[in-house]
Image (cartoon, grey):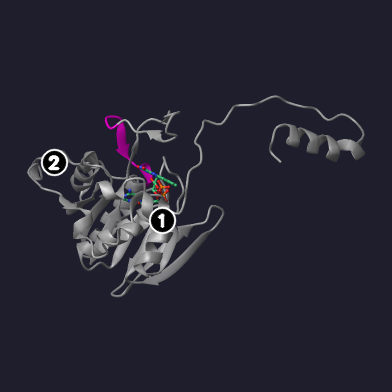
Amino acid sequence: MNICVCIKQVPASSNVKINPDTGTLVRDGNNTKMNPYDLYAIELALKIKEMKESNVKALTMGPPAATSILEEAIWMGCDDGYLLTDRKFAGADVVATAYTISQGIKYMGKFDLVVCGKQTTDGDTAQVGAELAHFLGIPYVCYVDQVLEVKENSIVVRCNLDKTYETLEVEFPCLITVEKSNDTPRLPSYKRSVQYSDHQMHTITFSKLFDTDESRYGLKGSPTQVERMFNPIKDDRKVMLDDEVDSYAKQLKDILKDRKYI
Ligand SMILES: Cc1cc2nc3c(=O)[nH]c(=O)nc-3n(C[C@H](O)[C@H](O)[C@H](O)COP(=O)(O)OP(=O)(O)OC[C@H]3O[C@@H](n4cnc5c(N)ncnc54)[C@H](O)[C@@H]3O)c2cc1C
C-alpha cells in the first residue's frame, strides 16, 4: 500500500509575533517543530504499515528549512521524504495550500491513503485535509484516532467525536485526518538517524507539477485576503447587571455595542 503523510513545520513557541508593518507572522526559522497532530498522523500511518505492508512517504510544503521535519519523520519510521517548495507557492492561503499539496501528491505517484493531522498549531484552520480530499477527488474521514482493520480495498477506522465514537469503513483511495489518541507517537530512532544520514529528500518545485497555471498557486491562487492581523486585546472587566429584569436586554445590547461586538 502507498501511504502519504502530510506534515507541517510550525513555530515551537506559542508566543507568536506579528510584524506590525506587514501584518504577517514573524516566522523564526530556528525555533520550529513538527506540528504535534502530525506526529499522531505519522504514528497512525506506521501502525497501518505494521498491519499491512506499505510504503510511507512524508510530504511537507514549506521553505527548505522544513527538511528537518522530513528527517524526523524518516527517523520515526517513514520510508521517504518530499519537500514541496518554490517562491511561487509563497503567500498561499488554505485553498492554494491544499491545491499545491494535491499537485505534489499527484507528482509523487500512485497512492492509496493520504493521512493528515487534525489541525495545526499555527494556522489552526483544520481545513487543509478536507480541501485536499476535494482536490484529489477522494472520500475523506476526520477525527480518526484508531485504525481497526486494513482490508484489501478499504480501511475501517474509529472516529473520536468527543462524546461518542463512530466506526466507519472507507474505500481506497481516501484521506483521513488524525486526532490525538492514547497511541503516543514513537520517538525518532538514533539507529535510523545513522542509517539514513545520507538520505536525500525529494524536492518538488513548481515546474515539476502537472498543473503549471500560476493563478492556482501562492498569493495569486488565494481567494482569502487578510485585511489586518493583531493580538486580541485582553479585556476582563466585569459588569454586574443588577437592575430590573426588563432592562437587562437593553443594557446588554448597549455594552456589546459600546465594545464594538455588534
Ligand atoms: C491570505 C493568507 C495568506 C497566507 N500567507 C502565508 C504565507 O505567506 N506564508 C505562510 O507560511 N503561510 C501563509 N498563510 C497560512 C497558510 O495558508 C496555512 O499555513 C496553510 O493553509 C495551512 O493551514 P493550517 O495551518 O490552518 O492547516 P490545517 O488545516 O489546520 O492543517 C491540517 C493538516 O493539514 C496538513 N498540512 C497543513 N499545512 C501543510 C503544509 N504546509 N504541508 C504539509 N501538510 C500540511 C497537516 O497534516 C495538518 O495537520 C496564509 C494564510 C492566508 C489565509
Badge 2 amino acid: Ser
Q: Nearer the viewer, residue 202 or 76?
A: 202
The residue that appears at 47% across and 47% down in the rendered structure is: 225
State yes or no: discs 2 and 1 in contact (Cβ < 8 Å): no
As drawn, 53 above or below 43: below
The residue that appears at 47% across and 50% down in the rendered structure is: 224
Q: Residue furthest top?
A: 237
Magenta segment includes 124: no
Neighbour tally class for label 1: few under 14, some 14-19, many 20 plus, Cα within 10 Å = many
Dividing the picture into quadrants, the one containing residue 155 is bottom left
Magenta residues?
Answer: 29-37
Badge 1 amino acid: Val
Q: Is residue 51 something one can see in this rendering? A: no
The percent coordinates of residue 101 (x first, y second) are: 31, 57
Q: Is residue 208 something one can see in this rendering? A: yes
Quadrant including the N terminus: bottom left
In three-dimensional space, the C-alpha distance between marks 2 and 1, rounded to whole angstroms, equals 35 Å
Q: Residue furthest bottom?
A: 153
Q: Nearer the viewer, residue 43 or 244?
A: 244
| Tag shown at residue 95 | 1
| Tag shown at residue 193 | 2
Element on which disc 1 rests: helix
Quadrant including the C terminus: top right
